[in-house]
Amino acid sequence: MDRLTIGIAAGGLASFALLYAPQPVLPHLAHEFQVTPGQASLVIGIATGALAVAVIPLSLLSEVVGRRPLILSSVIVAAVIGLCLPYVGDFPLLVALRAVQGVAIAGFPAVAMAYLAEQGRLKAIGMLVAGNSFGGMVGRLIAGQVGTYREGTGLVAVCAAAATVVLIWALPKRTEAVTRTTGGLKDAVTRPLLWALYAVAFLGMGSFVALYNSVGFRLASPPLELSPQVASLVFVAYAVGGFASATTGRHPNRRTVLFGMLGVTAVGVILTIPTHIVPIAIGFVLLTAGWFAAHAAAGAWVNTVAPSKGPASGLYTGAYYAGACIGGTAGTMVYAALGWSALIAVSLSWLSVGALGVLLTFRRNTRSSAKNLSRKTGAPLAR
């Protein structure tokens, strides 16, 4: 890997380790603060929600101040907050600080894809997603293996601070050309295909986070009754997800990759239905690999077709984390109220709607392009 890739990977590792570290210890957090599973999931939901709200303003800000300064400042602030969180003893204050941390983290995903695209490194977007997924896996595994909220998230924050130092060292220091305009936002919100891809990000990530939020509670409950240390091993599936996104991110046919990997995600979701650890584990490997590969394809597709990459990348990322917040929290509540089978049904419906939206929009765009070509050349339309 070159220096730029190392820097972006380190930033992704720090950001996403911090973002998702509390997830495997949500049952312990709920017990310590005496809150319900749905309330405990707010520690994840509020951070991803704040991230989703902040990415669009921050992506526009990066058009003025530059991508590199925004990336660095966001990761540094998030790491500092992460080091403070284990000392918080009040749940509402914890939720508030997680919201602030989510805003800080937003600066990295808001512009990282656009930064790589402007450097002529579209194929590296797959590696970016791989770094993000590896960070999420490391944060979850460390916290889960420690088994307690304060000690686990504190150790994750120390590791994220070390990754932040690597980011500062590795990110190229050359001066960027910045533009003082927000005109690209119009293109980002007027193209139907982009909206369809935003919907895939929202619905797919909502399904994904809902499943991961809920699986800790399911694995800790009868008949499985696994310890937090064993249950957290489900996050090893992130390693496969990172490999899949890095591999498929280089594939030129993003439409084929997107639909194929959404199908793999759906198969993985279905495999988690039995109350046996082996099919659950296989299912999470498949759904993680499928979703991260689909995410890499969709993100690269957005940055290929969008005239202004900063706003479009920001909107895509905003939809992604809005899905994590809204869908993740809603899905966890569905599980708490109706059980795992109901959550599976909801997740599959979300994935199906996302795929259908892209399919219909792509066909409409293809038909429109063919009509335009026919008008210009006089050639008949293919039937």
Image: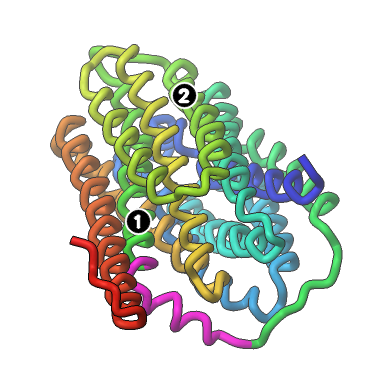
Give the side of residue 288 with respect to residue 11, left or right.
Answer: left
Residue 291 lies in quadrant: top left
Viewer can see residue 149 = no
Viewer can see residue 356 = yes
The disc label shown at residue 180, or none: none
Q: Mark 2 points at which residue?
A: 232
Q: Residue at x 31, y 68 (%)?
A: 365
Q: Give the range drawn in magenta.
A: 181-194
User: Which part of the image, by quadrant, shows the C terminus?
Assistant: bottom left
Q: Where is residue 218 in the image (x, y as percent from the top left)?
A: 29, 25
Question: SS of the residue at dot 2?
Answer: helix
| Viewer-side residue, 80 vs 247 | 247
| Viewer-side residue, 156 vs 190 | 190
How would you rate the neighbour count of disc 1 (Cα within 10 Å): few for under 14, some for 14-19, many for 20 or more?
many
Residue 359 lies in quadrant: bottom left
Mark earlier in primary sequence (1, 2): 1
Q: Mark 1 points at which residue?
A: 202
Give the side of residue 380 with respect to residue 256, left or right.
Answer: left
Q: Where is residue 66 in the image (x, y as percent from the top left)?
A: 71, 73
Q: Where is residue 240 in the image (x, y as percent from the top left)?
A: 51, 28
How would you rate the neighbour count of disc 2 (Cα within 10 Å): few for under 14, some for 14-19, many for 20 or more?
many
* Front of the two marks 1 and 2: 1
Question: SS of the residue at dot 1?
Answer: helix
Give the side of residue 337 with respect to residue 210, left or right.
Answer: left
| Residue 183 magenta | yes
For marks 1 and 2, give the CA distance. Answer: 25 Å
| Viewer-side residue, 214 vs 180 | 180
Kindly identify the amino acid type of the residue bearing the numbered disc 2: Ser
